[in-house]
Image (spheres, rainbow, N blue to C red):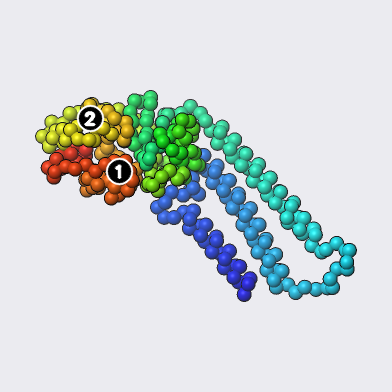
């Protein structure tokens, strides 16, 4: 019975590890989509293999001790106890050898990751806020939020910082975890082998809405990425449609201008996300909501119902002004 119970527990541990490493739809560190993530996954699999072998050996010895009948007489006093070699080998020599292998492979992985630095296709500055990500393309001269667009198959340099507390930048399929620290800039090299959308998040507890501080890395073919860059560099023209013009007036006459920026207007605050191309983004509130008309209306009028504790106050508008404001924001592509 004891051997059967131990076997069941072992199977349960392995099953949980398999489920947690690749939940459907969730970003999986064991599904690397870039060269750096592949190095990290190789190290994980080595550690898992060594742990599995050791676990199997220990369970085998336990089963042997439980079910193998003891034979022979006790050792005479003064004689060395039987099993001393097993204790020395299993308790000292083998752990030292395993740790040496893991240590050596870890150093090799860290060296390989550090050597990956090269001429970047683009440099992106990412700043963590409570609780959203500011994304700046300094060479192209524009800022966006919560989405990092990169060219697929090419290295990208990320400069990571924080505006308030320690956050942690983690896109499991592309790289390991890197802290964003106030007053200090960390550098990370990112590359996606194939076009796609890769989910990331803050992996360091940073306050009430830490769990809803997500980001997306959008890897695009180089020509599509270049078109996106050019589009993001353009300031939206003043609307000629009466409804959009009214929405623009509502925005500029409300408290929105104290926190947000829209290029080409007198809204230039950097306290909150830049809204110049809001409609082109996939989510609202750093991944809290899909960017749809209904969700945008709900976010404007009562953001704390979705993300309690965030720093955006509710905006009180009558139905006509709200309709016009949403129409204007949806035109900011």
| 171, above or below 61, in the image | above
Q: How crowded is mark 1: few (under 14 residues within 10 Å), some or many (20 or more)?
A: some
Q: Mark 1 points at which residue?
A: 284
Residue 203 location, x and y as percent?
46, 45
Give the quadrant of residue 262.
top left
- Does 13 appear above or below 96? below
Numbered disc in front, either 2 or 1: 1
Mark 2 neighbour density, 10 Å: few (under 14) some (14–19) many (20 or more): some
Residue 65, percent across and down?
71, 69
Name the residue located 24 percent from the left edge and 29 percent from the top edge.
267
Which quadrant is the N terminus positioned in?
bottom right
Pointer 2 residue: 236
**Relative to 263, residue 101 above or below:** below
Are the two marked residues, 2 and 1, in contact with CB atoms closer than 8 angstroms? no
Q: Nearer the viewer, residue 16 or 162?
A: 162
Please tell me which residue is depicted at 30% across the width and 49% down the height of the picture.
306
**Viewer-proximal residue among 276 and 202:** 202
Name the image quarter holding residue 60: bottom right
Residue 25 in sight here: yes
């Amino acid at each position: 019975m004891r051997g059967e119970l131990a076997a069941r527990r072992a199977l349960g541990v392995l099953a949980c590890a398999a489920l947690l490493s690749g939940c459907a739809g969730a970003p999986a560190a064991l599904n690397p989509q870039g060269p750096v993530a592949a190095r990290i996954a190789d190290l994980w699999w080595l550690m898992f293999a060594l742990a599995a072998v050791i676990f199997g050996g220990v369970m085998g010895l336990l089963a042997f001790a439980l079910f193998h009948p003891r034979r022979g007489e006790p050792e005479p006093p003064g004689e060395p106890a039987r099993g001393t070699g097993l204790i020395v080998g299993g308790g000292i020599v083998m752990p030292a050898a395993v740790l040496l292998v893991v240590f050596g492979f870890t150093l090799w992985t860290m060296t390989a990751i550090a050597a990956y630095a090269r001429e970047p296709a683009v440099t992106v500055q990412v700043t963590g806020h409570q609780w959203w990500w500011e994304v700046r393309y300094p060479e192209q001269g524009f800022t966006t939020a919560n989405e990092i667009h990169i060219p697929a198959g090419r290295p990208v340099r990320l400069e990571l910082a924080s505006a308030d507390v320690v956050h942690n930048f983690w896109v499991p399929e592309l790289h390991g975890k890197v802290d964003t620290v106030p007053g200090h800039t960390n550098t990370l090299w990112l590359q996606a082998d194939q076009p796609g959308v890769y989910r990331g998040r803050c992996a360091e507890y940073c306050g009430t809405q830490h769990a809803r501080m997500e980001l997306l890395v959008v890897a695009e073919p180089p020509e599509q990425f270049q078109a996106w860059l050019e589009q993001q560099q353009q300031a939206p023209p003043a609307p000629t449609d009466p409804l959009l013009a009214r929405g623009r007036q509502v925005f500029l006459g409300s408290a929105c201008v104290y926190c947000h920026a829209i290029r080409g207007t007198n809204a230039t605050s950097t306290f909150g996300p830049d809204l110049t191309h809001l409609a082109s983004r996939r989510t609202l509130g750093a991944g809290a909501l899909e960017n749809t008309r209904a969700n945008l209306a709900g976010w404007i009028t009562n953001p704390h119902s979705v993300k309690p504790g965030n720093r955006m106050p509710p905006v009180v508008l009558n139905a006509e002004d709200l309709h016009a404001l949403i129409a204007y924001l949806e035109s900011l592509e």
